[in-house]
Amino acid sequence: MATEMITLKLDRDFLNKVDSIADKHYQNRTEFIRTALREKIEDMDMKNAVLNFMKLKGSSDNKISDELYEKVRATVFDAISRNIK
């Protein structure tokens, strides 16, 4: 996979926090930032999926109870979270 270098400006205190975490848990600063960005993208994708799912609740002619809706929602999110990990 080809990579592209970017420039990122951070406040010194914030960068110190990044470096502190990166030193303890990652190979380097770049890996930490890559992982953080990946996780943010996955989080945004999940939020979009949730919004789309919630829109579907009201689009069916066959209305379901809130209890059944919550049960289905929990099942869907369990499946999604297993696929993300």
Image: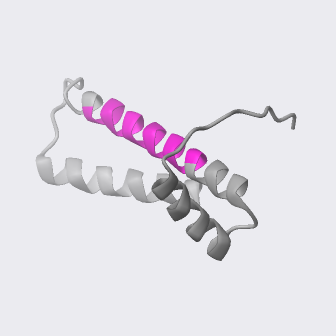
Residue 64 in the figure: left or right of residue 18: left
Secondary structure, magenta segment, majority class: helix
Q: Residue at x 77, y 34 (%)?
A: 5
Residue 34 in the figure: left or right of residue 61: right
| Nearer-the-camera pick, 1 or 68 | 1
| Nearer-the-camera pick, 11 or 58 | 11
Quadrant of the image occupied by residue 57: top left
| Nearer-the-camera pick, 39 or 60 | 39
Q: State whether residue 55 is above or below residue 39.
A: above
Q: State whether residue 60 is above or below residue 15.
A: above
x and y, in percent, of residue 69 in the image: 22, 47
Q: Residue at x 22, y 53 (%)?
A: 70
Q: State whether residue 62 is above or below residue 78.
A: above
Q: Is residue 48 magenta?
A: yes
x and y, in percent, of residue 17 in the image: 50, 63
Q: Which residues are magenta?
A: 37-54
Residue 9 in the figure: left or right of residue 68: right
Q: Quadrant of the C terminus?
A: bottom right
x and y, in percent, of residue 7 in the image: 67, 34
Residue projecting furthest to the bottom: 24
Quadrant of the image occupied by residue 84: bottom right
Q: Residue at x 54, y 55 (%)?
A: 15
Q: Residue at x 23, y 26 (%)?
A: 60
Q: State whether residue 17 is above or below residue 70.
A: below
Residue projecting furthest to the right: 2
Q: Quadrant of the N terminus?
A: top right
The type of colouring in the image is one colour
The mark tally for this picture is: 0
Quadrant of the image occupied by residue 49: top left
x and y, in percent, of residue 77 in the image: 40, 53
